[in-house]
Image (cartoon, helix red, strand yellow):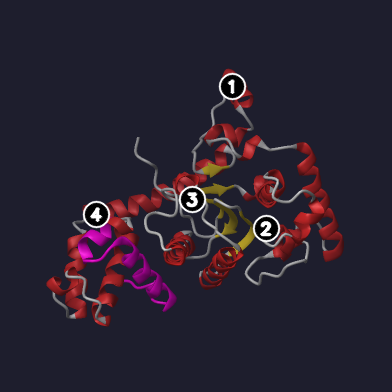
Amino acid sequence: MPRQARLDVPGALHHIIVRGNNRADIFTDDQDRARFLQRLGQNIVEAKCSVYAWVLMSNHVHILFRSGRKGLSAVMRKLLTWYAIYYNRRQRRSGHLFENRYKSILCEEERYFLALIRYVHVNPVRAGIVKTLDELDRYPWSGHSAVMGKQTYHWMDTDYVLQQFGTKKRAARKEYRQFVERGLSEGRNEELTGGGLIRSRGGWSQVLSERRRGQKEEADERILGSGDFVDAILTEAEENETRQLKIRRSGRTITAIVQEECLRGQISLEELKKGSRRSTVSAVRARIARRCVDELGLTMAEIARHVGVNTSSVTRAVAKLEKEGMASYAP
């Protein structure tokens, strides 16, 4: 069964899960963790996103954040490409570091925001990496320590988290910590780890009960939320897909975009496809990639086959374009 397209809705709350290939470790030591966080923070600031919770485990990462105007991929694509290159060079290895695509779940904030923060932050305790909540308060590789004021990450919006617990920071921290502690005593919340409809409705018993009463709700594996929320998100995604479909049906193809941009940049198709690194050619290649993503909904791998470089090179070209403030380019 083909995998579904990722739901990349700007301004939405996303729970991101990144796993090592074959569940292998993606961090060797604290230097790796620090570099990953440094790059994450840089990308978050550049893309004007907000991070509310995160944790670095040995072989996977959880991040809860609200995407900016450019959407989810503006952060994750650049982060994971950069880190994979860094890690492979440092460890003198080759091959895939991460398992397939990262997983992203678009979340209904009103229902699940606090539960997800707790779920993400207590991972080190559940895994036995730290033994107590006191240790977690100071553990540097979970965002919990930042909410508690023991660590500082300028790119993490701890104020927004604490505002959910009170107007005065000291009292809010106390309420937040008690909330986390209750979660540890209650055990694992399967509602946050199940799939689609089961996850959204609180388990199969609830789903079956509603079905017996003739009730049915929209559900999707990529979304954590009520049926109405799922329906609204899918409608928005469908509208974007419809826009891209109309563009494709109008005759716009990747070949046409390549030809238009080569003409605009005054370079030959031959030079583009031979992988030239000349600055003018690189700029054309980046514009082609950006347009193919926006207008046709193509993947970086599909684009790479038409512009003479590999997928990671296309990804870096787009990242550079966005960093220079040109991502809003319109032909």
Q: Secondary structure at mark 4?
A: helix
Q: Neighbour class for label 1 at 10 Å: few (<14), some, many (≥20)?
A: some
4 or 1: tag closer to the N-terminus = 1
Name the amino acid, label 3: Gly
Q: Neighbour class for label 4 at 10 Å: few (<14), some, many (≥20)?
A: some
The residue labelled by disc 2 is 142
Name the amino acid, label 4: Arg
* Place of residue 61 in the rendered image (x, y in percent of width and height, measured from the top left): 57, 53
* Place of residue 60 in the rendered image (x, y in percent of width and height, measured from the top left): 55, 51
Residue 64 vs residue 279: left or right?
Answer: right
Q: Quadrant of the C terminus?
A: bottom left
- Residue 208 badge: 1
The residue labelled by disc 3 is 20
From the viewer's side, name the closer residue of 174 and 136.
136
Does the rendering let one see residue 78?
A: yes
Residue 73 vs residue 281: left or right?
Answer: right
Q: Which residues are magenta?
A: 302-331
Name the amino acid, label 2: Ser
| Magenta highlight on residue 192 | no
Name the amino acid, label 1: Leu
4 or 3: tag closer to the N-terminus = 3
The residue labelled by disc 4 is 248
